[in-house]
Image: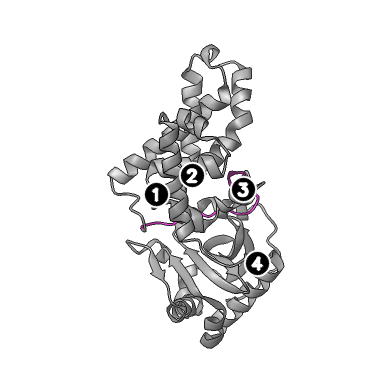
Amino acid sequence: MDSAAVDRFEAGRSRLASLAYRLLGSAADAEDAVQDTFLRWQAADRERIEVPEAWLTKVATNLCLDRLRSAQARHERTAGAWLPEPLLEGDPMLGPADTYEQRESVTLAVLTLLERLSPAERAVYVLLEAFSYSHAEIAAILDITEAASQQHAHRARTRVAAERRRGGAADPASARRVVEEFLAAATSGRTDRLVALLTDDVTAVSDGAGLARRLLRYTSRERVASFVRAGFRPTPAKRRLAGAPLAMHLARVNGTLAVVAVAGERVVGAVAFEVSDGRVSSLYGIAARNRLARLDEAWQHRAPGAPVIAAW
């Protein structure tokens, strides 16, 4: 392959990776899909490809759909069985992030909801909301009719909107104050204060450190507070399991504020928060090691600053 063809592909690699991540919810799988797209590009008769960007988008999207359908057929991605892979702020896979819809499409809340859609609905939603493709363009990418694209979009938007009802999102400074107060209450045992910091329709989702067969879900303020209190309560057994002194940092993960737990220099867990009207409306806890690899790698290349809890 000549250098011009390689350069043309590399110019669009980040966009393809962002697309694949939104479709698959896994950075590792997204990278594999992009590499497979490159192999198809390498083998293609490129002189007959009129619009390389459109061709690459079509190939990458359909490779991702093949992965989703294959995983579902093998029951590896049953809805409710896993959480998306969290990404640290600045990760190129989180782009584009110019519009509200683009930023919203990469939050852990929306990526988790997309797991409940069919592969086709998920693809149409991502192409439409995150990449601003028209229904005519989506129809060409997916080899469906425009009417089918519109139907998939309607169903996807309806399902996402039905579970994303909430008040106004907090500005970063306000969100930080709420999460800091929440963390202080969680680690000190102030359950009554924890309950007060939760919205009436709060939800908490955890992967159970990767040990549970299905995601753990909690929906009442009291149950969420009890779950959080148990999770953040420091015990000798938890400290031994961490294997090193544990510190809690605040960082932005998938566009929202998160508590990142670091043992020594290794990320061992992350809890992402959504804050609405001065209270926590949802939490997503991820501690499965295979879901933290990219976040951990990014963490090693940044100056995290002072932890909010230096010795947990």
Are the residues flagged by discs 1 and 2 in contact, CB closer than 8 Å? Answer: yes
**Frontmost residue, 89 versus 105:** 105
> Helix, strand or loop at disc 4?
loop
Q: Which residue is mark 3?
A: 91
Instruction: Looking at this view, name the residue that lies furthest to the left.
Output: 74
Query: Residue 170: which numbered mark, if any?
Result: 4
Instruction: Tell me if residue 154 comes above or below residue 163 in the rendering.
Output: above
| 169 sits to left or right of 30 | right
Tell which circle, 2 or 3, labels the residue nearer the N-terminal end. Answer: 3
Q: Residue 121: x percent and y percent?
A: 42, 44
Give the class, few, some or many, for how many residues have Cα within 10 Å of label 4's Cα (few <14, many ≥20): some
> Helix, strand or loop at disc 1?
loop
Mark 4 or mark 3: which is in front?
4
Tell which circle, 2 or 4, labels the residue nearer the N-terminal end. Answer: 2
- Distance CA(mark 4)–CA(mark 3): 22 Å
Majority SS type along the magenta span: loop
> Helix, strand or loop at disc 2?
helix
Q: Residue at x 48, y 76 (%)?
A: 228
Q: Residue 53: x percent and y percent?
A: 57, 26
> Helix, strand or loop at disc 3?
loop
The amino acid type found where label 4 is placed reads Ala
The amino acid type found where label 3 is placed reads Asp
Tell which circle, 4 or 3, labels the residue nearer the N-terminal end. Answer: 3
Instruction: Looking at this view, name the residue that lies furthest to the top.
Output: 47
The answer to if 109 sits in the magenta stretch is no
Query: Residue 125: which numbered mark, if any?
Result: 2
Mark 3 or mark 1: which is in front?
1
- Distance CA(mark 3)–CA(mark 1): 25 Å
The amino acid type found where label 2 is placed reads Tyr
Mark 2 or mark 3: which is in front?
2
The amino acid type found where label 1 is placed reads Leu
Q: Residue 158: x percent and y percent?
A: 45, 53
